[in-house]
Image: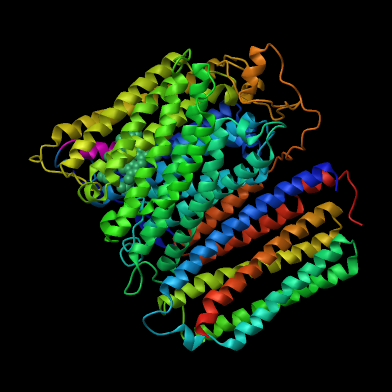
Amino acid sequence: MNWSEITVHIPFFGESIFLTIDVFIAWILLIVLVIGAIVYAFRKRKFPVIRDYLYTTNHRKVGTLYMIFGFIFFLRAGLDALFIRLQLALPNNNFMDFQLEKYNETFTSHGTMMIFFAAMPMLIGLMNIAVPLQIGAKDLAFPFLNAVSLWLFVAGGVMFGSAYFLNSSPAIGWTGYAPYSTAVYTPGAATNFYVFGVQISGLGTIFAALNMIVTIVRHRAPGMKLIRMPLFPWASLVTSFLIVIAFTVLAIALYLLMFDRLFGTSFFGGEEGDPVYWQHLFWFFGHPEVYVLALPAFGLFSDIISSFSKKPIFGYPAMVISLALIGFLGFMVWAHHMFTVGLGPMVNTFFAVTTMTIAIPTGIKVFNWIFTMHGGSLKTTTPMLFAIGFIPSFVMGGVTGVMLAVSAADFQLHDTHFVVAHFHYVILASTILGIFAGLYYWYPKITGYQLNETLGKWHFWLFLIGYHMTFLPMHLTGMQGLPRRVYTYGSDEGMTALNFTSTIGASLMGVSIVILVWNIWQTNRQGILVGDDPWDGRTLEWSVASPSPEDTFTPMPFIECTDPFWDAKTKGQKLKTAPNPRPAPIDEHTVLPFLMALAVLVIGFGLIYQSYLTAGIGGVAIFALFIIRSFRDEHTSFHKEGARHE
Amino acid sequence: MNNTDAALFKDKKMGFLIYLGIEAIMFMVLFMTYTIFTPPTKDPFPADIFEIKTVVLASVFLLSSSVTLFLSDKYLKKERKTPFIIWLVLTFLLAAAFLGVEINEFASYVQQGYTTSSNVFMGAFYVLVGLHAAHVVFGIGWMIILFIHHIRKIPAPLFLSKQTIFSYYWHFVDLIWVLIIIIVYVPYL
Ligand code: HEM
Ligand SMILES: [Cu+2]
């Protein structure tokens, strides 16, 4: 079968694009799905709801949108993962046209989308939903900016996602290594999609982090000192600092790469440029990024474990300090991704040691989770199952991490499936299990309903088994030398059974995701309201109505201890109220954030196809929107009643 | 300012200061890039193309614009409108003059054939100093909007907050220029 011979040409910014058969099918599926969604929305009269969400700046609704779009990109990137696994299922396999360049495109899309457009947004979504409710804030500090962040992420994701449909997926790996990513080796639109897609959504992420910091520092309920704050907000705070530093460095790295690609500089290639400089910049972002993914999950597991053990978290101060320590050390280890570059034994030793050091605060956390459960009355609800599944799985990923930190060993293991196994172990155990746990845990706060527990447990077990089945064999194939980013292997290499097992595991995960989707569908259809406090929780979010109303915390509670809601419940009292809470951020109903992101999307497409006229139009639009915003921001309308400037 | 104004203004100040921290990191990386690749191994060399006159002229304009903005702020707080607007207009003019000098400098380089692709030093120079110049352009646009808000007579506390945020921005842009003088120009003059 040679699918790629059937092609359709469509003009696009003066370029014509080969429409291979798989892309053609994808187009048809997309169109059917979109039409289906529109018809559904029409039948069920959902347009007012859609409009409401398009205009919203409320933290729960913005968070929900983050979750929805993040989940869509998760499905897309998961599909890529399945294609990768199908191609690798058998030796010398030819699954559709997923060989050679197409394979490169597939793992690049998979990695980039999972990290930037699935995992991070869903975590930020959970932060948006839960953090204000947990600290007694009425909203994020800057609701408008929050909506801007959301739509920038969506714009970046849609842009990156559209590359496949235009048959110009980037094929440079999620790491975008130079000089391959420079215009000399990958000219044309494909790599530009990587540069601008990640850049745009990265901007949104930076703003989201800034917002989160101000919210946590300045909008806590009266009496909620930092040391009384639940651990998820703590983790979000540390994470936000990591984002602010790491993503900014990435932004400049991409800015330089953009100049290399479009405007003739040669920082990362050519006779003067330095490809290793790209690696330094990228990994100075890239390593903290894995903590950006992991720390929020640590925080949310801490809250969940404490909730369902009916005990306060063990060693709260140690938990906070280790979060901060991990965040700090995270910036001192980046060159462990570059052991084989040839930086020299001293450099390698330094980075090997710092890397191993991180195991210490992480170990502290693991023991504290276990001690929290020890002697508690455990309730094995679905969120708790995910938390319990997380601990040993994550530790396994951590152990292989320390193995890779031995720089001598890394020379052998580098760029093999051992590394693929390692980072999937840590990321899936922390981030993905964490996102699922958070979704089940806070679903009542998002919708008012509780996801079905039986289906939830099916989801958990299938996913956990599938996950170990997929990635455990990769340690072995990796040690046997199966290189990553290579689309096949020989039948005489003795890896067939292991690889086939991996592929079966991946399909089990796929099935579990179908169960999750079914669960969400059923739960929403049945619509059984479960009340404010279905889990018998400990922290403030369970004291407000479900789903959380737009005006929360009226009256404002006064906090005197950690786990205030639990404390009040056990004493049979109501939460004390604070007489004079600080003024709330002003909520708005505005489509400007959406339009701003749209303008940025236009600029991005203009630059991708080097149609500077298009980019210019987008540029004018964005500045016009800035000005409009300046003239009708929420403070102005707020002041309409007040005195005039005279 | 009433209670709500004051609290929201503090939020905004903190948020904007963090934003400037982000910008500072961005410029730090660009300064690092510049120092890594300068001096270059091939023509053009910074010592051959930088001119003391331009740097001094640009600096005088931009640095004094910080002083005039400071004075403008002072009179705004004292609610003395005439001196406030005069100093703000002066700030605007100085910024425009700085921009003129910059455009001139860039144009003369381009005329001599020194573009982003000449060598990696020129590239690093343009992405750094160019980004700074873009900030100045943005600031000039921002001042125009401030004038309009002033004429519209928006509520006083709101105007004060807008002006304060702008002056944070402007002083930051100035600070970056000082670093540009020290790191980009002075070693090669
Ligand atoms: C859900 C099941 C998943 C499966 C079956 C899967 C499978 C794979 C495989 C086989 C590769 C290696 C491709 C190769 O190097 O030849 C890969 C790469 C990668 N995966 Fe996954 N993955 C999954 C989920 C995730 C998640 C949740 C994330 C992150 C949030 C992730 C991030 C990555 C990254 C960053 C790469 C590296 C891409 C590159 O080499 O540029 N994956 N995945
Ligand atoms: Cu790392």
Q: Main secondary structure of the magenta part?
A: helix
> Horizontal placement of A571 versus A365: left or right?
right
On the image, the x and y values in percent for residue A465 come to: 30, 24
Task: Using the image as rendered, state which of residue A75 and residue A395 is in the foreground.
Answer: A395
- Whether the magenta-drawn stretch holds residue A82 is answered as yes
Residue drawn at x 72%, y 25% as measured from the top left: A557
On the image, the x and y values in percent for residue A264 come to: 42, 72
On the image, the x and y values in percent for residue A131 come to: 60, 33
Q: Please count the marks in the image.
A: 0
Residue A359, located in which quarter of the rendered image? top left
State which quarter of the image contains the N terminus of chain A: top left
Task: Using the image as rendered, state which of residue B20 and residue A111 is in the foreground.
Answer: B20
Task: Name above or below for residue A638 compared with residue B47.
Answer: above
Residue A147 in view in this figure: no
State which quarter of the image contains the C terminus of chain A: bottom right
- Whether the magenta-drawn stretch holds residue B97 is answered as no
Residue drawn at x 21%, y 39% as measured from the top left: A88
On the image, the x and y values in percent for residue A125 come to: 54, 36
Task: Name above or below for residue A232 compared with residue A160.
Answer: above
Task: Using the image as rendered, state which of residue A323 and residue A460 is in the foreground.
Answer: A323
Task: Using the image as rendered, state which of residue B21 and residue A255 is in the foreground.
Answer: B21
Residue drawn at x 78%, y 72% as measured from the top left: B68
Task: Name above or below for residue B89 compared with residue A434.
Answer: below
> Horizontal placement of A458 versus A375: left or right?
left
Q: Which residues are magenta?
A: A80-90
